[in-house]
Image (spheres, helix red, strand yellow):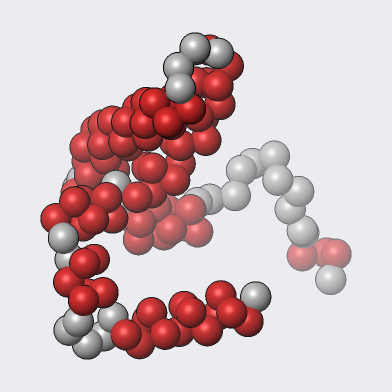
Amino acid sequence: MPLVAAVSAVLVLGLQLDGPGRRLLALAPLVALGRISYGVYLFHWPVFVLIDRQAWDLPVGLTFAVKCAITLVVALVSYHLVEQPVRTSTWFRPGRVLVGALGRPVPRWWPHRSSSCR
């Protein structure tokens, strides 16, 4: 674990300055992958499991490529049809949701404390 922490620290510090690592991570395909990375993270496991259950008779490398391609397509569709509309919507504002949740009246069936119980 200390090695992972040290490598992470070197990467974070090294990417602050212009250099080969920063230029590599600024490439358009990697930036695009970064935009949909949550969807890739979210959908890769179910896609891989479902593909494995199909037991297709394909070489291992081709099966992996198919899994990755399907994962990327599903993540891209999710990004455009779910993530972006929610992020740019006017009907969903996290502040309003929190205030609405905190300001909700107590239901009538909730046990009340009467003033005589003090």
In the displayed orientation, state which residue is furthest to the left: 28
Residue drawn at (45%, 84%), measured in percent from left and top?
9
Q: Farthest residue to the right: give it.
A: 117
Q: Nearer the viewer, residue 76 or 51?
A: 51
Q: Residue at x 21, y 37 (%)?
A: 80
Total number of numbered labels? 0
71 to the left or right of 55: left
Q: Residue at x 26, y 36 (%)?
A: 76
Residue at the image point whose x is 26% and y is 74% from the top: 21
| Location of residue 109 in the rendering, given as x and y in whole percent from the top left corner | 69, 39
* In this picture, residue 60 sits left or right of residue 2: left
**Of residues 89 and 38, the one drawn nearer to the viewer in this rendering:** 38
Mark yes or no: residue 87 visible.
no
105, above or below 22, in the image: above
Quarter of the image for the N terminus: give it: bottom right
Query: Residue 49 lies in what quarter of the image?
Result: top right
Furthest residue toward front = 59
Seen from the viewer's position, the closer of residues 108 and 13 is 13
110 with respect to 72 (left or right): right
Q: Nearer the viewer, residue 88 or 5?
A: 5
Point out residue 114 in the picture as x, y percentages from the top left corner.
77, 59
Residue 33 screen position, x and y as percent: 27, 50
Q: Position of residue 79 (x, y in %)?
A: 27, 40
Quarter of the C terminus within the rendering: bottom right
For this view, does 36 lie left or right of residue 26? right
Q: Is residue 54 visible?
A: yes
Note whether 69 is above or below 17 in the view shown.
above
**Could you say which quadrant of the image residue 28 lies in?**
bottom left
